[in-house]
Image: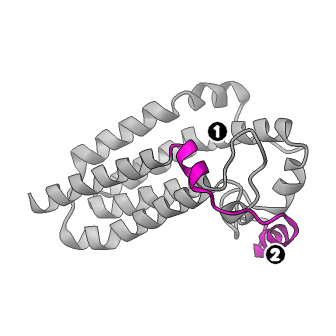
């Protein structure tokens, strides 16, 4: 049996804070960002890579219908969260305000990690094959402690190959992340040159 990182009561309570915490982070980024052309050039490609990872993952995810094991899910169990981390890191670099990165790291650790744990508990109940998948594929990155790329590679070769589906991308409403990203980029560019 897998050990839990967070008490269930805490995880349940903060899981409801995920969306409000996201709005708080957006407000903090908007208010405190001090972007410059150089910080935008360094941070926005990283943020765009995170957004692209999220899009790729969303095109492979049929929530509560089947266990996602193809695309980026062959390499880590939570590519949407990894994409969020990359996007936030890139936006923090673009914003040129280090404490914004610290704020996001704190929110990720205190709010998003418990949400991940709850989601994995849900998946384990919903899909009997989840335990085997979780044993072979790392939580957030192929080189997560205790696992190497061999587990991810084995999973990628043993699982059925799935294709990216635009219909899934739209069904998962991932376009909202794209719209938010574009609005954030516009704001940062305006702050840098305005």
Disc 1 on helix, strand or loop?
A: helix
**Is residue 71 left or right of 158 when viewed as pictured?**
left
Residue at the spot 68% in from the left edge and 24% down from the top edge: 9
Locate the C terminus by quadrant.
Answer: bottom left
Residue at the spot 32% in from the left edge and 73% down from the top edge: 42
**Is residue 171 left or right of 63 when viewed as pictured?**
left
Please say if the residues under marks 2 and 1 sit with CB atoms less than 8 Å apart.
no
Residue 30 seen in the figure: yes
Residue at the spot 76% in from the left edge and 58% down from the top edge: 69
Residue topped by disc 2: 150
Q: Is residue 117 shown above or below 46?
A: above
Residue 5 seen in the figure: no
**Is residue 132 left or right of 84 when viewed as pictured?**
right
Locate the N terminus by quadrant.
Answer: top right
Q: Is residue 133 shown above or below 1?
A: below
Disc 2 on helix, strand or loop?
A: helix
Other-residue count near label 1 (Cα within 10 Å), few / some / many at <14 / 14–19 / ≥20: many
Q: Quadrant of residue 123?
A: top right
Please state the total of marks drawn on the protein image: 2
Q: Is residue 124 shown above or below 88?
A: above
> Which segment did they paint magenta?
147-173
Q: Is residue 61 shown above or below 15?
A: below
Give the mark, 2 or 1, whose residue is nearer the N terminus. 1
Q: Is residue 153 magenta?
A: yes
Q: Is residue 159 magenta?
A: yes
Of the pair 2 and 124, the residue shown nearer to us: 124
Of the pair 61 and 168, the residue shown nearer to us: 168
Which tag is nearer the camera, tag 2 or tag 1? 2
Other-residue count near label 2 (Cα within 10 Å), few / some / many at <14 / 14–19 / ≥20: some
x and y percentages locating residue 71 in the rendered image: 68, 64
Q: Quadrant of residue 127?
A: top right
Report the disc number at residue 114: 1
């Amino acid at each position: 049996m897998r050990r839990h990182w967070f008490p269930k009561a805490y995880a349940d309570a903060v899981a409801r804070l995920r969306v409000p915490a996201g709005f708080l982070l957006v407000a903090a980024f908007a208010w405190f960002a001090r972007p410059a052309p150089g910080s935008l050039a360094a941070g926005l490609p990283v943020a765009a890579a995170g957004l692209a990872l999220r899009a790729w993952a969303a095109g492979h995810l049929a929530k509560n219908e089947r266990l996602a094991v193809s695309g980026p899910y062959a390499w880590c169990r939570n590519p949407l969260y990894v994409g969020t981390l990359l996007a936030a890191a890139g936006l923090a670099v673009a914003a040129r305000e280090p404490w914004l990165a610290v704020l996001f790291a704190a929110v990720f650790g205190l709010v998003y990690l418990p949400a991940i744990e709850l989601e994995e508990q849900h998946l384990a109940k919903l899909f009997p094959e989840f335990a085997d998948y979780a044993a072979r594929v790392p939580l957030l990155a192929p080189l997560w402690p205790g696992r190497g790329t061999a587990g991810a590679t084995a999973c990628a070769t043993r699982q059925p190959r799935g294709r990216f589906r635009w219909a899934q991308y739209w069904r998962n409403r991932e376009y909202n992340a794209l719209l938010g990203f574009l609005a954030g980029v516009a704001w940062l560019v305006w702050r840098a040159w305005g």
